[in-house]
Image (tube, rainbow, N blue to C red):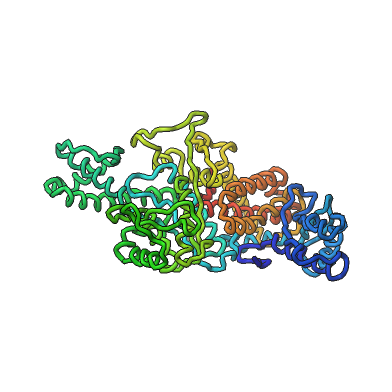
Amino acid sequence: MAHSQEETGGPLVLYTVQELITDALERALSGGDLPPVDASDLPPVVVERPQKSEHGDYASNIALRLAKPMRMAPMAIAQAIAAQVTAQVAAQGLVASASAGPPGFVNVSLDHAWLTDQVDIVRAAGDSFGRVETGKGKTVQVEFVSVNPTGPLHVGHARGAVIGSGVAAILDAAGYDVHREYYVNDAGRQMDLFARSLYARYMAVFGSDLQLPEDGYKGEYVADLAREIADEHGDQFAGLPEAEAVARLRGLGLTRMLAIIRSDLDNLGVEMDVWFSETSLFEDGSYRRVKKMLKDKDLLVERDGALWFASTTLGEDKDNVIERTGGDPTYFASDIAYHWDKFVRRGFDSVIDVWGADHQGHIPRMKAVISALGIDPDRLGFMITQMVKLKQGESAVKMSKRSGDLITLKELVDEVGVDACRFFFLSRSPDSQMDFDMELAKEQSSENPVYYVQYGHARISGILRLAIERGIDYSEGDSSLLVHEAELALIRKILELPELVDHMAERREPHHLPHFAGELATAFHWFYQQCRVVSSEPGDAKITAARLKLVDAARVALARCLALMGMKAPERM
């Protein structure tokens, strides 16, 4: 993928260095400094940030990868490439020097003047800092949460909600046109069980001993819901035929449960652009149309009284039922129509489904069926979220005080706060199980990463307030005066954000952001410890102005991290 040197939210330096080394390699080959290599043996140049600063700002192992096809020592190859990079230093102004490092790395160091100039660029970018154009305006739909509207959201759903909204925010910052969607499973057996359970609880309010259906919903929230409906509507449904009463209560229960789910998500800082009804797929003919398309391709077979999608003819291990005996469509049936609607009717360039761990096995059949419908399966991506275990220090938290089941999302948010929920859930790769330490999440110390990062922003805000109180105008500060190791390390860390956004968007990995925010806060705290920012000494006015500019740039970067994570950027703590 081609990347410009300067995009809307700051420089993507890594790709510029990658292009410089690639050009240097081509010049070394064309000039005879390196032996010719068959194009198939020429690997792409990969550039990374070395862990140790003495190795420069960027490094590439291209010489090590070329040693075998060139039959040449890696150090000699690295020296030839570095010499070509150095020859172009004056022309581009970004790089100060390039050198070869053992056992064969090409190390690149950035120019000091260029580096310190970025302080003003970051400040000018403001809320746009970190925005890149990786997506180039392509549409992507992120479908997440999508829990059956038959009960309140719990902790596991909270993780999917935060990860879905987090990856959506990253994709938006990377230049995609993002659509956030909740798929409302308002059709099928689970809604029937919910409606019948609600009916039994409603009738109990008026003295009936009607039993809950087998596999019905037994949570106390169903009884609460029934009492609310009884308070509002009285006994008007008690005298109706059971089927009619169940249907009326189904609609009322669905409306109320969706309102609860919307409220819980809103409290977690999660917004949806669309709430898509499963029922609409059957009412508008989408399912009939897709069913006919599969039938015309001879991919539907009747067996044992049911209708099956012939997945095995497409290489899958087994066929999958789309209509049960009696003709009732399965969840898979509506999923097929839903994904056809996403790709064909609404025309999204790509789709990301954020699913729970119990849906892992559904991925191959979804890929197979959309391929059968003529849709490139690579356009459909998945993020699978694993289980969450709640802890209070060393003790496991298992039961909810109110629902008698898993801890609800609302209970967790009430207990530890929105910011802690979002930070902790984002901080682990979704495909890894996680322990959520509620005790740590509430701790107000540097041991709590949420507090540590937000305190960094509050400290920055305090410094800038002090400058205002003292009447210091740092707008004309000269950032070239920033030469201390801690100052330059902070600038370098700030400049990683656009590259990180690009990386996270391409790999769908928002979990890197909380870790980077912690590293950025650490870089700032170290700078603050090493360098006195606001000095009252007359001779320190210039360095004070320069350092205040850097503090302001750090504010921009840290605030952007917090905003992308959906967290507050406090000015006081």
**What number of labels is visible?**
0
Q: From the viewer's side, name the closer residue of 385 and 192.
A: 192
Q: From the viewer's side, name the closer residue of 415 and 72.
A: 72
The residue drawn where x is 76% and y is 65% is 22
| Rendered location of residue 561, percent (x, y) | 57, 53
Instruction: Look at the image and tell me whether residue 178 can be seen.
Output: no
Q: Quadrant of residue 291?
A: bottom left
The residue drawn where x is 55% and y is 51% is 562
Query: Which residue is the extreme one toward the front?
Result: 303
Q: Quadrant of the N terminus?
A: bottom right
Q: From the viewer's side, name the closer residue of 504 and 453.
A: 504
| Rendered location of residue 211, percent (x, y) | 21, 37
Is residue 293 toward the left or the right of residue 2 in the image? left
Q: Quadrant of residue 67?
A: bottom right
Is residue 555 toward the left or the right of residue 38 in the image? left
The residue drawn where x is 77% and y is 58% is 62
The residue drawn where x is 33% and y is 52% is 304
| Rendered location of residue 462, percent (x, y) | 59, 48
Instruction: Look at the image and tell me whether residue 328 can be seen.
Output: yes
| Rendered location of residue 201, percent (x, y) | 22, 40
Q: From the viewer's side, name the closer residue of 231 and 71.
A: 71
Is residue 399 toward the left or the right of residue 470 in the image? left
Query: Which residue is the extreme one toward the left?
Result: 239
